[in-house]
């Protein structure tokens, strides 16, 4: 099954490695039989699991209350008395351990929290990062039973070598290196034992609890807990069938190939799934090797331009998202690998975002209206996406949120002013029925990861110039398609403006250049002021209103 010297035939339609261990023929994949009905059925079942019943599932609710109660009791008795920072670190550690004991749904929640740097406390984010690939592994005996039962043959009959220690262990599955009897190096994703039973129980509890949070905590209301549970349910329901993940992988491969420049190199690629060794609980894939995402020093030492890698990744991600409506929905460091030639391999397609035509147009309009400083377009896009009701008073939203006023740099505001601004904005959004719909959740989660990646991959690159380059590329390469999708005449797209990008970052009109390092300093200053305000301490006299380094227009 090894590839020929000529380009593999599957490169004509998919973004794969140049020399694969086998060629994927979409018309000859036995494991795809009947999948047309599996995805809709899994989605319907997930929504049923996430709906709120009249009475809570007693056994599961008592179990959750017991485990979380013990974690909170330990924090209250010990960590709470050790000062603010130690208190939060202790609580985060205890919650992470409790989530691991509670099982896959709660570990998945921890993974979502781990992508919220700048949104959640840094101690919580740092602790829950361990939920990505440091979940306790299953015994190899259980892995062997699953592989042999799913593939219908002894392990030794299929694999020349199968490493018992996993590369990574996560909430739903763990991944092992192996070599097939036919000589190909592969990775094998193996589902955890009894996962289906745990998921059903946990989602029933979450579905009952989520509506109780609506309207009680402003941030939770905006995050739309019932929709978040629905995202969990749909995601995990699909992750329980690895045939759907393999199909997600092929769909993204097609999109990346279609959006790549004609005759140009595809900056993102995916591993090939095996033509026959894919089942509901086992997924055998091509093995790809490279640099861990974020290991910028090693990449630079090998001559890789990390800033160029990040820019190419973001362009390819946005192209697939806004032009095809299909995108990797769980970007994090464990799911990306930088190859020696500077291309990026996407891994783990259990969470794949899929936008319907209206949602894709809404997200496309949001990206472009932000880039062109079109405030009305931004509000209209939020309506299309379902973040605001479709009949909302657009002018009222703009007025109440002061979107028609010059941007006030938040680093020039004191703690009291910042707190009041956040409180008033949250109150206004809730008054309009704002919510965070599923596609927007996944998109924002991915964008948070890419933003954080700049800290190591491109800390001194001008963020404003980078955003102008990327958004101008989208217009130049796909302007006719974008205009048609938005119902505009060809060539009528407005130019990308620095004003819109400054507004999105909370910058004044005098800022012409801003590196990510400087952007991080701004965020730290804002967080510090808010923390002082919560602690009842005044801002110190003489603290600079703007972090050093933000370049003003002469």
Image: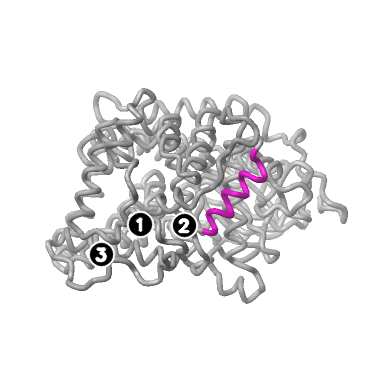
Percent x, y of residue 231: 42, 37
* Magenta segment includes 217: no
Provide the residue span drawn in magenta: 465-479
Q: Secondary structure at mark 3?
A: helix
Percent x, y of residue 79: 19, 64
Q: Secondary structure at mark 2?
A: helix
Q: Please say whether residue 150 is visible from this viewpoint.
A: no
Are the residues flagged by discs 3 and 1 in contact, CB closer than 8 Å? no
Task: Name the quadrant containing residue 549.
Answer: bottom left
Residue 63: mark: none
Answer with mark 2 or mark 3, whichever residue precedes in sequence: 2
Q: Nearer the viewer, residue 520 or 266?
A: 520
Is 78 left, or right, of 460 in this rendering?
A: left
Answer with mark 3 or mark 1, whichever residue precedes in sequence: 1
Q: Please say whether residue 259 is visible from this viewpoint.
A: yes
Q: Which residue is mark 1?
A: 118
Query: Residue at the spot x=66%, y=74% of the render?
Result: 302
Against 554, is 363 above or below?
A: above
Are the residues flagged by discs 2 and 1 in contact, CB closer than 8 Å? yes
Crowd rating for badge 3 (residues with CA inside 10 Å; few <14, some 14–19, many 20+): some
Crowd rating for badge 2 (residues with CA inside 10 Å; few <14, some 14–19, many 20+): some
Residue 528: mark: 3
Q: Main secondary structure of the magenta part?
A: helix
Crowd rating for badge 1 (residues with CA inside 10 Å; few <14, some 14–19, many 20+): some
Q: Nearer the viewer, residue 297 or 288?
A: 297
Query: Residue at the spot x=70%, y=64% of the render?
Result: 341
Q: Nearer the viewer, residue 510 or 311?
A: 510
* Residue that extends furthest to the bottom in the rendered view of this protein: 301
Q: Which residue is mark 2?
A: 451
Task: Name the quadrant containing residue 202.
Answer: top left
């Amino acid at each position: 099954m090894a590839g020929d010297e000529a380009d593999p035939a599957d490169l004509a339609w998919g973004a794969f490695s140049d020399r694969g261990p086998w060629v994927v023929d979409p018309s000859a994949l036995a494991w795809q039989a009947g999948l047309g009905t599996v995805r809709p059925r899994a989605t319907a079942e997930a929504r049923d699991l996430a709906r709120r019943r009249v009475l809570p599932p007693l056994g599961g609710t008592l179990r959750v209350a017991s485990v979380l109660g013990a974690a909170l009791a330990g924090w209250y008795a010990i960590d709470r008395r050790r000062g603010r920072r130690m208190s939060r670190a202790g609580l985060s550690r205890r919650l992470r351990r409790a989530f691991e004991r509670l099982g896959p749904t709660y570990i998945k929640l921890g993974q979502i929290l781990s992508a919220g740097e700048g949104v959640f406390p840094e101690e919580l984010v740092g602790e829950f990062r361990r939920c990505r690939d440091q979940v306790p592994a299953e015994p190899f005996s259980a892995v062997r039973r699953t592989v042999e039962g799913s593939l219908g043959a002894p392990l030794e009959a299929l694999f020349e070598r199968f490493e018992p220690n996993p590369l990574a262990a996560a909430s739903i599955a763990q991944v092992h290196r192996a070599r097939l009897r036919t000589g190909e190096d592969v990775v094998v994703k193996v589902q955890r034992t009894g996962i289906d039973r745990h998921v059903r129980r946990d989602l029933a509890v979450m579905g009952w609890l989520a509506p109780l949070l609506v309207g009680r905590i402003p941030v939770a209301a905006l995050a739309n807990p019932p929709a978040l549970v629905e995202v969990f349910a749909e995601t995990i329901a699909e992750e329980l069938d690895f045939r759907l993940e393999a199909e997600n992988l092929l769909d993204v491969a097609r999109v990346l190939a279609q959006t790549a420049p004609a005759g140009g190199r595809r900056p993102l690629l995916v591993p090939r799934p095996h033509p026959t060794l894919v089942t509901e609980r086992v997924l055998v894939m091509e093995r790809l090797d490279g640099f861990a995402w974020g290991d910028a020093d090693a990449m630079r030492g090998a001559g890789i331009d990390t800033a160029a890698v990040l820019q190419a990744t973001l362009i390819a991600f946005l192209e697939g998202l806004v032009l095809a409506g299909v995108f990797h929905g769980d970007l994090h460091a464990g799911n990306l690998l930088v190859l020696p030639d500077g291309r990026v391999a996407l891994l783990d397609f259990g969470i794949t975002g899929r936008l319907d035509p209206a949602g894709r147009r809404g997200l496309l309009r949001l990206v472009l209206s932000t880039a062109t400083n079109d405030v009305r377009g931004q509000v209209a896009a939020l309506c299309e996406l379902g973040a605001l009701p479709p009949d909302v008073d657009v002018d009222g939203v703009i007025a109440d949120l002061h979107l028609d006023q010059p941007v006030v740099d938040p680093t020039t505001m004191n703690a009291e002013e910042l707190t009041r601004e956040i409180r008033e904005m949250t109150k206004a959004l809730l008054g309009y029925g704002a919510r965070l719909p599923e596609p927007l959740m996944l998109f924002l989660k991915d964008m948070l990861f890419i933003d954080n990646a700049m800290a190591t991959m491109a800390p001194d690159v001008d963020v404003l110039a980078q955003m102008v380059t990327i958004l101008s590329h989208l217009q130049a390469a796909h302007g006719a398609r974008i205009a048609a999708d938005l119902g505009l005449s060809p060539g009528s797209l407005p130019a990308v403006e620095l004003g819109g990008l400054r507004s999105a970052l909370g910058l004044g009109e005098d800022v012409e250049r801003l590196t990510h390092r400087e952007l991080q300093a701004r965020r730290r200053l804002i967080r510090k002021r808010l923390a002082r305000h919560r602690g009842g301490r005044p801002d110190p006299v003489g603290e600079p209103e703007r972090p050093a380094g933000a370049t003003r227009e002469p």
